[in-house]
Image (cartoon, helix red, strand yellow):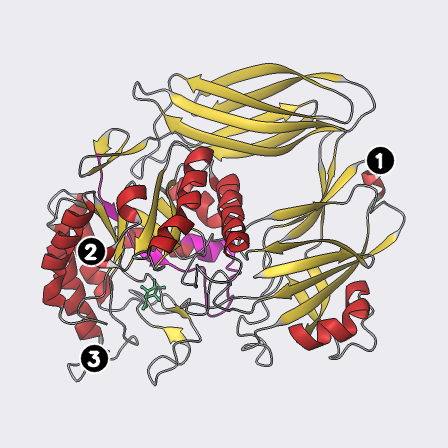
Amino acid sequence: MERIAFPLDGAWEMAPVEQAVELRWWGPRIRSGLSEGFPIATRKVRVPSAWNDGRDPELNLFRGSCVYIKDFRLPAAFKGRRTVLRFDAVGQRCTVYLDGEALGSHEGGYTPFSFDLAGKAAPGRSHRLVVVANNQRSEQTFPAISGDFESYGGIYRSVEIIGLPAVHMDKMLAIPSLSADGRGELSISVSVRNDSKRRREIELRAAVTGRGLKYISTRAVTVKAGAVASVTLKMRIPGVSPWSPESPAMYDLAVSAAGDRLRKRVGFRRIEVKGNHLLLNGRPIRLRGANRHDDHPDFGPCLPDAVIRRDLELAKSINCNALRLAHYPHREKTYELADELGILLWTEIPFVGGDVWTGDVRRRNLALQNMLRELIERDCHHPSVILWSVGNEVASDHPACRRFMAPLYKLARRMDKTRLVTFASNRGTNEIVSQPFSDVAGVNQYYGWYSASVNDVSGNMDSIHRALGKPIIVSEFGAECPRGRRGRKDRWTEDYQVALYRHNLRVLGAKRYVVGLFPWALFDFRSHRRMNVLQHGWNRKGIFDDRRRPKLVAKVVREFYGRMARGEG
Ligand code: ADA
């Protein structure tokens, strides 16, 4: 018996409510989804979508809670199955109720989570699902107030109910890499649950196929009635083609247990740091990158697959071989396409700013650990991902911050020994987190934009490198201008952006300890913090504008990265 899915995307009812007051007064009605008599009448929306994606002017600036209501009946095929309600992501935190009863809450707007509906939902009955989503920011949230991008709110990725067979796999982590002798390595850890009333002896089977290869590994597993068995399967596969940006060789992985089957696409590559070098499959590589936000003027954070593909192709068109997915996990399709198109990824959790040594520090650290765990669980099979980043521009010159970040590094390394761990710092030589913890140091610098002169780039980067003693990825540099604004009257012109890029690329590209360049940013992106006369709610540091039209600087990057790719940079 295979697992089945019942999609809950499509038409939902939705109403905005003010978090503090209305949830207290109207709580019981809201939890039950009794929309008649709600403080604000419900409206029809399509899930997935974000309420502040720009399409509804009334809600575009709303930072608060919205209630989503959906009535559904499960099809007969769900009879006798354990059912699980799965959200691909809800921005930014939510509480979920089924038929008036709380199923639980989730914090973090970018990764999947699920609730067990065993004994709570069955075919033949009508059910009411209520989701209260909230997108407010404070110094205690992740991202915090200072985060320079939109906090999208709502059910903006897919929702479904999954019907599981009696024996099924709960969670699967498949981590691929490449051994020094060229074998494909795959570590598969999975929990097998037996919901039946008798003990089951099953065969766990993993098959890797593709490119003329078929490699199968099996393991006998005994699971008592009502119990869960955790199993790890290690495969060492001869004859694989290594994955790389030039040759992104992908394979199909199918893991099955008593009829339940999970599929993923995997690829095999090795990433390491040796001295001042970054090595991909044993050979030095320099990352020709850019920073991308998961954002679009027409779709907010719900970019159609074809638009994501086009974004990645645009990155390749300016000779990028890498992207930093700032500052949170992007839609999973992005990673699938990066695998397929051969783009190396830096991916991170939304630990952006925030006052990390006040309030309930422990609770907030656990919330971040959970975001990191969910990111690694979701994306650890993608060969494109080479760097887990545990944050951006936090107060990493402060001892309390170092203590706060240590568990995040530890968790990433415990879950995945094959990737590098980093974070993006803007604390220059005062940095006390990258030095002890990062495999490669991420450095954000805006010489010539926010600070002093662009001529400071070289000396300052050398000082940072001396202080940290490890290879550096310049994770941000850039200048802002609306596309088409020309001249020399001030810094906000395409001409100034070009000059700043030319200097940074030339100076940083010549430093061999700089193993990656990630200009800020690939595209202009929404940010309501950005309200000066030239911004109107957009951060305009893109190489392309919000509609993906190139600025003059696109040619500068394309030519420089082209030379770098040919080994001339
Ligand atoms: C910071 C931050 C980015 C971006 C950038 C800017 O370095 O990490 O999120 O907002 O500044 O444009 O100022």
Label 3 residue SS: loop
- Tell which circle, 2 or 1, labels the residue nearer the N-terminal end: 1
Q: Which residue is mark 2?
A: 429
Q: Residues within 10 Å of mark 3 (few under 14, many from 20)?
A: some
The amino acid marked with disc number 1 is Gly
Whole-percent x, y for residue 569 in the image: 12, 48
SS under mark 1: loop
Q: Which mark is residue 111?
A: none
Is residue 6 in view from this perspective? yes
x and y percentages locating residue 283 in the rendered image: 22, 31
Say which quarter of the image contains residue 461: bottom left
User: Residue 164: where, in percent of width, then height?
Assistant: 73, 35
Decide if residue 503 is on the left or right side of residue 206: left
514 sits to left or right of 326: left
Mark 2 nearby-residue class (10 Å; few <14, some 14–19, many ≥20): some
Q: Nearer the viewer, residue 161 or 319?
A: 161
The segment highlighted magenta reads: 284-309
Please name the residue that numbered disc 3 is placed on: 486
The Cα atoms of the two marked residues, 2 and 1, are separated by: 61 Å
The image shows residue 457, relative to residue 386, as above or below, that is below
Q: Which residue is mark 1?
A: 80
- Distance from disc 3 to disc 2, alpha carbons, whole Å, reads 35 Å
Residue 438 visible to an observer of this rendering: no
In which quarter of the view is residue 486 placed?
A: bottom left
